[in-house]
Image: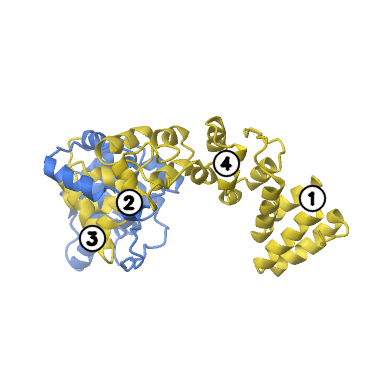
Chain colours: A yellow, B blue
Amino acid sequence: MQQHLPDDLWIDIFSFLPLADLCAPCFTSTTLRDAVCHLIHSRLLYPTYWWRHRKQLPVHNMEIAEWWLSNVREPTELEVLAAARTNQVELVDLLGWDDTHLSARHRNLTRFQPGLSWWDWSDILPWGSKRIITACLKRGHLTGENRTLFDCTPLLEKERPLDIVRWIFQMPVEDLPSIDNFFTVRYQRFIAYELAWSGQKEAITMLKQQELIDPWLGNLMYQGAGEAGSMDMIRWLDMSLDKFVGSMDLSI
Amino acid sequence: MASESISVTTSDDQTIQLSRKHAQMSQTINSMLEDSVGADQEAIPLPNVSSEVLKKVIDWCTHHENDPAPVEKVKKLNKKREYKAKNSTISDEWDKNFVNAELRVIVDILLAANYLDVKGLFELMCKHIANELKGKTPDQIRERFGIQDDLTEEDKAAMRKAWGATKNDS
């Protein structure tokens, strides 16, 4: 391109970019770097401390990630989770399913507690979709001994929570591998509580139709709805569950 | 009574007729019209805009002539101390097709929108270029926008430090 943009217009253009996308322009030329600095300084209440803030680097594709891995720094949990959220398995592979492969210096800088990995598969999985879940299984993370690490509640807030509920309750789901010996009855009860707490009537209806709601599960659903302070949900459970749970024997 | 159309002269000496409605979407032309009330109605000179680009601007104005006037937002400092970018999503399908052009044309329209002070069009072009920048490495940005690398090794080291991990990343 022969026509150069006037310097001040770069600031207007950069104002549409999230912080992560301002990193590469900083390494492009003094004009672009100065425009980024000007923008950041004009947007923050305490710009002097900006350099100490959490700074996610861009994860749009492999090329940009490879660039900053070679030229800027090693990854943090911010980039790995961003890659998981956008279902980029190859990128998660590149950045790592945990932080153990990183340099000692970087680990020491980013770990909350020495010796404790700051992220691992159990942090990544809840933010990914079926592709990430499948990759996680293939890499051998979803085993019985790891089950206590895994909190899948963010998965229930994603676009297709019904599929995740079916998967946890060991029903076949398209594009999701079934796993044995991972989701225990105790875990399923925890999910039942979460479903009622977050008012997911569709998923609860599906569990009813599959005759999977025993009195204990029903009890936990009432508890979830109650602790969420949702009278609407309690009434809905009252109207819906008795047909399926029968006597609602809560003495278990 | 003011005439319904306005003549403008472009950088390539073309005289183009603009409807008053379209002319008023440009703050620059609007100000010129206000300044020339009562004077002889000569063509307004636009020495920084070619006829080709002005036609594009008119196309955009025609599509958006019934849009509500943009509201000037008061710039506030982010009290959460977190950087917040403006929304770069281009939602209008017509706009998406409009920006589907060579970068040379996009930059010309951006410069024209800036000079003519057509806020919506300027914002659209900025969004489009911002979206183009996403996911590009410094080399790719330089190549795409014809930028020279004038950063010294010290500059780059300072940027590495600035974008480096801190204890707050954890």
Indicate the quadrant where residue A15 lies. bottom left
User: In the visual, does B80 lie left or right of B103?
Assistant: right
The Cα atoms of the two marked residues, 3 and 4, are separated by 45 Å
Q: Chain of mark 1?
A: A
Q: Position of residue A244 (x, y in %)?
A: 84, 53
Q: Which residue is mark 3?
A: A41
Q: Position of residue A5 (x, y in %)?
A: 19, 45
Tell me whether circle 4 and circle 1 mark residues in contact (CB < 8 Å).
no
Q: Secondary structure at mark 4?
A: helix
The Cα atoms of the two marked residues, 4 and 1, are separated by 29 Å
User: In the visual, does A98 lie left or right of B77?
Assistant: right
Please tell me if label 2 and label 3 are on a single chain.
yes
Q: Secondary structure at mark 2?
A: loop
Q: Chain of mark 3?
A: A
* Disc with the residue nearer the chain's start (3 vs 4): 3
Please tell me if label 4 and label 2 are on a single chain.
yes
The nearer-to-camera label among 4 and 1 is: 4
Let me know if residue A192 appears in the view. yes
Q: Which residue is mark 1?
A: A208
User: Front-most of A5 and A236?
Assistant: A236
Q: Which residue is mark 4?
A: A146
Q: Residue furthest right?
A: A247
Q: Secondary structure at mark 1?
A: helix
The nearer-to-camera label among 4 and 2 is: 4
Q: Secondary structure at mark 3?
A: helix
Q: Which residue is mark 2?
A: A55
Q: Quadrant of the C terminus of chain A?
A: bottom right
Q: Position of residue A67 (x, y in %)?
A: 29, 35
- Residue at 50% across / 41% down in the picture? A121
The nearer-to-camera label among 2 and 3 is: 2
Please tell me if label 3 and label 4 are on a single chain.
yes
* Disc with the residue nearer the chain's start (2 vs 1): 2
